Image (spheres, helix red, strand yellow):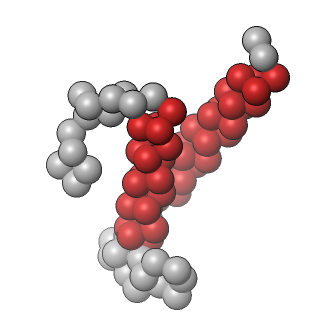
Amino acid sequence: MSDACSMLRHLARNQALANARLSQACLALGPGEWEAPRTSFFPSLKLTMDHLLDADRYYAETISPGCLDSLPARGG
């Protein structure tokens, strides 16, 4: 396996771990916290996570065009 391929696999594993940790943290939120106003670049945790999902989908499609075709449309 090439060094570049090994690095990309390592980054993908790190991303999967980060996504799992974020998901667990979001599942632990209390009522109203998901959409509560926040002082940040995005005005809520929901909108922050929407942005992260959009970025992940963009990179997945860039690396492997068509890989998301079988998934429901975003928000669906």
- Residue at position x 69%, y 37% from top? 11
Image position, residue 61 (x, y; %): 42, 37
Q: Residue furthest top?
A: 1
Left or right: where 55 falls relative to 75: right
| Quarter location, residue 33 | bottom left
Q: Residue furthest left?
A: 76
Residue 24: tell me if it is visible: no
Image position, residue 76 (x, y; %): 18, 49
Q: Residue furthest right?
A: 3
- Residue at position x 50%, y 43% from top? 59
- Residue at position x 61%, y 47% from top? 18
Left or right: where 48 falls relative to 70: right
Task: In the rendered view, tell whether residue 72 sits above or below residue 34.
Answer: above
Image position, residue 29 (x, y; %): 44, 65
Along the line of sight, which residue is nearer the eye, 12 or 46? 12
Along the line of sight, which residue is nearer the eye, 62 or 13? 62
- Residue at position x 54%, y 53% from top? 22
Along the line of sight, which residue is nearer the eye, 26 or 53? 53
Task: In the rendered view, tell whether residue 14 sits above or below residue 75.
Answer: above
Image position, residue 12 (x, y; %): 62, 34
Task: In the rendered view, tell whether residue 2 sits above or below residue 42.
Answer: above
Left or right: where 13 falls relative to 49: right
